[in-house]
Amino acid sequence: MSNASVSLAPPDNSTNAWINGLLGVVIFSGSLPATRIAVMDLPPLFVTVSRAGIAGLMALAALLYFKEKRPSKQQLWPLTIVAIGVVVGFPLLSALALKYITSAHSIVFVGMLPLSTALFGVLRGGERPPTAFWVFAVLGSLLVIGFAVAQGISASPIGDILMLLAVIVCGLGYAEGAKLSKIMGGWQVISWALVLSLPVMLPLTFVFLPDSLSSVGASAWGALAYVSVFSMFIGFIFWYRGLAQGGIASVGQLQLLQPLFGLALAATLLHEHVGIGMLAVTIGVILCVFGSKKYSARK
């Protein structure tokens, strides 16, 4: 199967862009709750490298099956940035953060991802959204930051810092991957990024394998399977395609909806407390996504 047969739809296909982006967000919404479940029984480093190793093997199989041509030398560095940001950086930093904070608390930080993605969309993708777009994007992020500060020192400064770093590297990986998806295709970008990291992640999976697995419950294995198959691979197929079709800054604002889905999962699956403050912040950032969408514009 050639690259042409799986190429992206035209950039002005905004309906498909937002549908693909929303599907990606829905899949990603389960990432932090699932990671929280996984790290209850498994070490964060093992969860990070094993999810990348499993997804990398899936990606390698897909690339071989469809006989995709290898990336050019010019594409290797952008693919490396994608790997650092979304294959290693965000999974590792968020897994470490979830040792200090609840998934409900960490999910609110996801509300900052649209601004991070938009900023890197300007720096790396050459996009220039209008001023009104930035007003809504910054407002949504300030709501998230204000919530984190209001939690006080009792929440965990270490967990908050780790989640902030995770959001920064993830935004870079999203923007770089979306830019490259316009040329290579969404699933090819995440697949090659995973394959590039496979020689490191797969051996480390065995290095960080716990000495005893007898105490690991079925829920932890199920959570690991979810973040490996869906969060690390399938979700990116839709997400990168949506960003490439509709614009990094514009479609990236859909991430403001992710806290709502994530908080619902945290409350349902983990029985974590979702207070009025969390709900208020979530509603605020949802309103901001509609405002930023109205005023967003592609270059």
Image: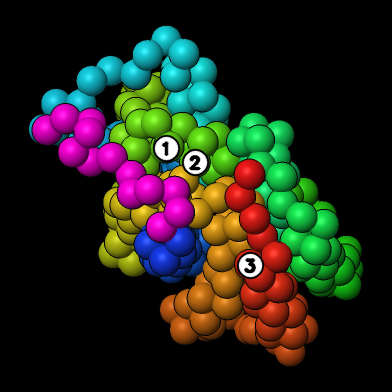
Q: Position of residue 210 (x, y in %)?
A: 39, 41
Mark 1 residue crowding within 10 angstroms, few (<14) / some (14–19) / many (20+): many
Q: Is residue 164 magenta?
A: no
Give me the residue at 23% from left, 31% from top: 3
Kind of residue sitting beneath label 1: Ser
Given residues 128 and 90, the one toward you in this image is 128
Q: Please tell me whether the stretch drawn in magenta is mainly helix, strand or loop.
A: loop
Provide the residue designation for mark 3: 293
Q: Which residue is mark 2?
A: 178
Q: Are marks 3 and 1 in contact (CB under 8 Å)?
A: no
Q: Looking at this view, name the residue that lies furthest to the top.
A: 73
In the rendered image of this protein, does residue 110 appear above or below residue 248?
A: below
Which residue is most to the bottom? Answer: 276
Report which quarter residue 257 is drawn in: bottom right
The residue that label 1 is drawn on is: 181
Q: Give the side of residue 215 with respect to residue 270, left or right.
A: left
> Which quadrant would the N terminus be assigned to in this image?
top left
The location of residue 84, given as percent across then percent down, is 54, 30
The alpha-carbon separation of the residues under discs 3 and 1 comes to: 21 Å
Residue 2 colored in magenta in the image: yes
Find the magenta span and give its range: 1-13
Give the quadrant of residue 242. Answer: bottom left
Residue beneath the point at 38% across and 62% down: 16
Real-space Cα separation, disc 2 to disc 1, in angstroms: 5 Å
The answer to whether marks 2 and 1 mark residues whose Cβ atoms lie closer than 8 Å is yes
Relative image position of residue 222 (x, y in whole percent): 30, 61
Specify few, some or many for label 2: CA neighbours under 10 Å numbering under 14, 14-19, or 20 or more: many
Q: Say which element carries label 3.
A: helix
CA separation, marks 3 and 2? 18 Å
